[in-house]
Image: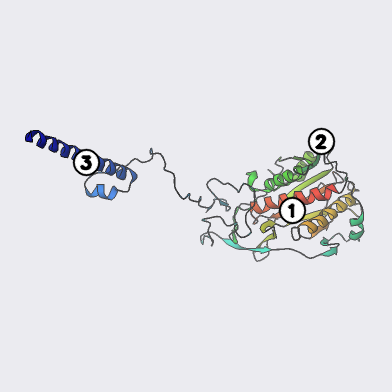
C-alpha cells in the first residue's frame, strides 16, 4: 500500500515537471519569434529566426504617421500622397508630421513669405487694380446688373475649366522652397483641378448645375488658350444652358531677391489661399472680338463685393487689365487665380470651397 502511494506521488511530480518544461519552451518560442529574445538565443548558441517577412504584421497600439520626405521633384510628398478628407487643415497645422523644418543644404533653396495682398482703387467694400487707362467708372459698373439669370434648378449653368491644367501646389508649408521644385503636375489631386473640384461641389450643393472639364490644355504650354477655347465651345454646344464660364488658374510671384510670396488668408480658423479675379478690357476696340467685356466686369465686381462681405481677406484686389484670355466667349466669363505654387493644396481646396459659396450667393441674386 505504501509502495502504491509513493508511486502515485512520483508520477504526479513528474507530470508537473513536464508541464512546467512545456510552458517554458512555449514561452521561449514566442519570445524568440517576436525578436525580443534574439540576443539571448545568440548567447546560447542558437540562431535567431532570419526570415520574418512572411510573418503577419501585428497591430500597433499607437499608429505611426507616414514620414514626409522631399520628393525628387521638390514637392513634399508622402508614401500614400493622401490629403485630409475635407481638404482643409487647422490654421497652424499644415506642416505634416516628419516634415523638414530647414532645407537640405545640398539643394539650392529660397525663402517663402506668407503675405496678404491688398491695395488699389477702392470700389465699394473692396479694391481694384486698374491698369487699363480706360477711365471706366468701376463704381458705376458695380451698380449695373450683369447679364446672368441663374435658375438654380440643377441644370448645368456653370462651366469650370483650366487653361493651365497642370499648375501645381505644394503639399506642405515649411517656409522655404527648392529652386528646382516642380511647379506643374500630372496628378490632378495636387493642382488647380483639385481646387476646381471643390468649387464645383460647393456650387452643386447649392443647386447650381456644374460641368467641371478637366481636359489637359497645357501639355505644350504654347497654344493653351487655343485649346481651352475649344473646350469652352464644346461645352457650350453640349450644355446650351451654361451662363458662367470659370477659368481657374494658380498664380506665381517671386521677387528679384528670390522670395516667393504665399498669399494667404485666415478664414474660420483655417488657412486659405488668397484668390484673385481678373477682368479683361477692350475699351478702344483693338481686340475687335471682345465687345461684351463690360458684362464680365459687372459680374466680377458683384462677385468681389460678395466675397468681401462673406469672407473678408479671401480675395486679393481685383485686377482690371487690357487683356482677353478667352473671356470673349460668354457674357459671364470669369478668370480666377487661386494662390501660388507655394500655397498648399489643402489651402487651395479650401479656397475652392469658399469661392463656391461666394459664387452661389452672388449668382443667386441674379435671377
The residue shown at (84%, 64%) is 122
Q: Judging from the image, what secondary structure is the residue with disc 1 in? A: strand
Nearer-the-camera pick, 17 or 250 = 17
Which of label 3 and label 1 is nearer to you? 3
Nearer-the-camera pick, 175 or 144 = 144
The answer to whether residue 181 is left or right of residue 14 is right
The residue shown at (52%, 60%) is 104
Visible in this render: residue 221? no
Label 1 Cα crowd, 10 Å radius (few <14 / some 14-19 / many 20+): many
* CA distance for labels 2 and 3: 81 Å
Q: Judging from the image, what secondary structure is the residue with disc 2 in? A: loop
Location of residue 352 with respect to 136 vertically, above or below: above
Picture quadrant where residue 51 is located: top left
Of callouts 3 and 1, which one flags the residue occurring earlier in the amino acid sequence? 3
Visible in this render: residue 145? yes
Residue 239: mark: 2
Of callouts 2 and 3, which one flags the residue occurring earlier in the amino acid sequence? 3
The residue shown at (90%, 60%) is 139
The answer to whether residue 358 is left or right of residue 166 is right
* CA distance for labels 3 and 1: 74 Å
Location of residue 37 with respect to 121 vertically, above or below: above
Q: Give coordinates of residue 17: x percent, y percent.
A: 19, 40
The answer to whether residue 271 is left or right of residue 139 is left
Q: Give coordinates of residue 65: x percent, y percent.
A: 50, 51
Location of residue 40 with respect to 9 vertically, above or below: below
Nearer-the-camera pick, 183 or 149 = 149
Determine which residue is flagged by label 3.
21
Q: Judging from the image, what secondary structure is the residue with disc 3 in? A: helix
Q: Are the residues flagged by discs 3 and 1 in contact, CB closer than 8 Å? A: no
* CA distance for labels 1 and 2: 25 Å
Determine which residue is flagged by label 1.
337
Residue 36: mark: none
Amino acid at each position: 500500500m505504501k509502495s502504491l502511494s509513493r508511486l502515485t506521488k512520483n508520477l504526479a511530480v513528474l507530470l508537473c515537471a513536464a508541464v512546467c518544461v512545456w510552458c517554458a519552451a512555449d514561452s521561449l518560442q514566442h519570445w524568440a519569434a517576436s525578436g525580443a529574445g534574439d540576443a539571448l538565443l545568440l548567447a546560447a548558441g542558437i540562431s535567431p529566426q532570419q526570415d520574418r517577412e512572411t510573418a503577419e504584421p501585428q497591430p500597433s497600439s499607437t499608429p505611426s504617421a507616414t514620414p514626409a520626405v522631399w520628393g525628387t521633384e521638390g514637392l513634399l510628398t508622402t508614401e500614400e500622397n493622401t490629403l485630409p478628407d475635407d481638404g482643409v487643415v487647422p490654421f497652424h497645422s499644415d506642416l505634416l508630421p516628419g516634415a523638414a523644418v530647414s532645407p537640405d543644404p545640398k539643394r539650392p533653396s529660397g525663402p517663402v513669405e506668407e503675405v496678404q495682398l491688398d491695395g488699389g482703387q477702392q470700389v465699394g467694400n473692396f479694391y481694384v487694380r486698374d491698369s487699363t487707362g480706360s477711365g471706366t467708372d468701376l463704381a458705376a459698373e458695380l451698380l449695373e446688373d450683369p447679364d446672368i439669370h441663374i435658375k438654380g434648378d440643377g441644370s448645368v449653368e456653370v462651366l469650370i475649366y483650366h487653361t493651365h491644367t497642370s499648375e501645381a501646389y505644394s503639399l506642405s508649408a515649411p517656409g522655404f522652397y527648392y529652386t528646382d521644385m516642380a511647379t506643374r503636375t500630372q496628378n490632378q489631386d495636387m493642382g488647380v483641378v483639385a481646387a476646381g473640384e471643390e468649387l464645383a461641389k460647393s456650387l452643386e450643393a447649392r443647386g447650381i448645375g456644374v460641368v467641371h472639364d478637366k481636359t489637359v490644355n497645357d501639355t505644350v504650354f504654347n497654344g493653351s488658350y487655343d485649346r481651352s477655347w475649344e473646350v469652352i465651345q464644346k461645352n457650350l454646344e453640349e450644355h446650351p444652358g451654361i451662363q458662367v464660364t470659370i477659368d481657374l488658374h494658380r498664380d506665381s510671384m517671386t521677387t528679384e531677391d528670390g522670395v516667393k510670396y504665399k498669399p494667404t488668408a485666415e478664414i474660420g480658423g483655417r488657412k486659405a489661399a488668397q484668390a484673385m479675379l481678373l477682368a479683361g478690357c477692350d475699351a478702344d476696340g483693338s481686340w475687335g472680338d471682345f465687345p461684351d467685356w463690360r458684362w464680365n466686369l459687372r459680374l466680377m465686381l458683384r462677385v468681389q463685393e460678395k466675397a468681401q462681405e462673406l469672407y473678408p481677406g479671401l480675395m486679393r484686389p481685383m485686377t482690371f487689365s487690357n487683356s482677353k484670355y478667352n473671356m470673349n466667349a460668354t457674357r459671364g466669363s470669369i478668370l480666377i487665380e487661386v494662390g501660388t505654387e507655394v500655397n498648399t493644396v489643402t489651402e487651395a481646396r479650401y479656397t475652392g470651397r469658399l469661392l463656391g459659396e461666394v459664387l452661389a450667393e452672388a449668382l443667386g441674386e441674379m435671377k
